[in-house]
Amino acid sequence: MASEKTGSRRPLSGSSIMLGNRLGALAALCAILMAQMLAPPMAAAETLTVEQAVAIALRRNPDLLAARQELEIARALVVKAHYLNQFNPQVEAGASQAHFQFSPGGNEAQPAASVSLELEVAGQRGKRIEEADQNLARARANVADAERRTKARAQYAFYQAVYLRQRLELMQQIEDLNLRLRDASMVRFHSGETPKLEANLAAVRYDQSRRTTLLARRDYENGLRAVQQILGMLPRGAIELSGSLSHHAPEVEPKLALQLAMANRPDLRAHDYEIKRITADIALTRRLIIPNPIITGFAERTADAPGQFIRVLGGSVGFSIPLFDHKQAELTALHGQLRRASYERTAVRLTIEQQVRDALAAYDSAREVVQLFESDAVGRIRESFGLIEGSYSAGKTGLIELIVAENDLVATDSSYLDALWDCEAARIGVETAVGRDFQALVKP
């Protein structure tokens, strides 16, 4: 019976198997589509302009946020300087025990209390306020200088990433060209027009260009992460930079640049305020030589006999005698700080002048290099890429001649891109050295 039942089973036909395979593939496709529909949408890349990048850096850069805390410290000193009095009243209380030896004898407690207050004289409060105000102005100048440097870092990182993106685009164009040339060489090899060696060389050249593109992509991604770091952003979300390296390199006025630098550099102003602060501190210290009076009021209850008390109210004025301490050590130290601040200001002024001159020299050099690459010349370079590809595909040019021509075109295009980046970096250097927007330095 078992053999009969077994023999009665019919094998599946080929059409049934194909139908089952198609249903399985359809089910897998539906599962993929459902997973894509249920998956959270990918966040769109955030597009940033250089102005937006600078604004975010000035708002979120952690180094700048830390530097701005100097303002809070300076404001606290201003608040303290405006106290009506720098000294709090001192309250004292005590008691003594009176012992009567004669009849009827006994003991009586004699309580006493006093209040004393030290008063500032000789205009100490005004000089202290002046010193705190100059310190706050110095802190503001230091923060402005930190903002100047943060802005430069943000611009530099932004345009460096833009440069790396344009370099990646150039490498991708070269890779696409070498891919088409490789395919064309295979066609020519199979048709018997070229030897196997030429096809192999074209394949190797494509592999090299592919590797160069991958390295360029790595550099560009690193550049984007550097931008995110400067902006104080977590390197999680994708960003897209809106902008390109400028082809316009206007001429600047050196004398105007130097004048604006001396008038606008916040680090130089910070040293000016530091000199004023130390000068105010010296004046305050000289006022401190005059001793502050200490006003004291007291109240006592004295027992001259058992059960008989006398209440005593009184006051006193005291002050220290500047016999040994004339603030000579403090004044000597402050005069040393004043001379040091003066020397540092001179050094900063010389440094600013040198920075401006070096930045202008770098910009002029980069500007001349950019002018060598005229826009029409660059257009002819891009056009030449298509010409050499068509010439090789038509069999008019050999692979060796094509490689030489392509190397020259790639080197020229890369040099032009490098020149644009050097000019952009030099422009940022001039703007940072002067402390003003670049447009304020352009010759009319």
Image (spheres, rainbow, N blue to C red):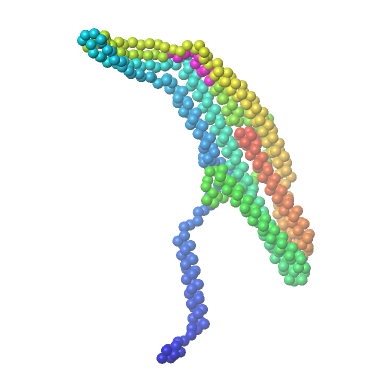
Residue 260, picture quadrant: top right
What x and y, as percent, mark residue 225? 57, 48
User: Residue visible at 55% across and 18% down?
Assistant: 329
Closer to us: 67 or 268: 67
Q: Main secondary structure of the magenta part?
A: helix
User: Residue visible at 60% across and 51% down?
Assistant: 221
Q: Is residue 1 left or right of residue 305?
A: right
Q: Is residue 366 above or below residue 265?
A: below
Closer to us: 93 or 281: 93
Residue extending farthest left:
104
Viewport quadrant of the C terminus: top right
What x and y, as percent, mark residue 39? 47, 60
Is residue 146 in view from this perspective? yes
Q: Which residues are magenta?
A: 281-293
Q: How many numbered markers are drawn?
A: 0
User: Residue visible at 77% across and 71% down?
Assistant: 192
What x and y, as percent, mark residue 268? 60, 28
Residue 349, picture quadrant: top right
Q: Is residue 412 above or below residue 27?
A: above
Is residue 380 in view from this perspective? no
Based on the picture, tell me whether residue 290 belongs to the magenta stretch: yes
Q: Is residue 36 above or below residue 154?
A: below
Viewport quadrant of the N terminus: bottom left
Based on the picture, tell me whether residue 175 belongs to the magenta stretch: no
Q: Is residue 134 left or right of residue 413?
A: left
Q: Is residue 45 left or right of residue 80?
A: right
Closer to us: 60 or 163: 60
What x and y, as percent, mark residue 245? 64, 46
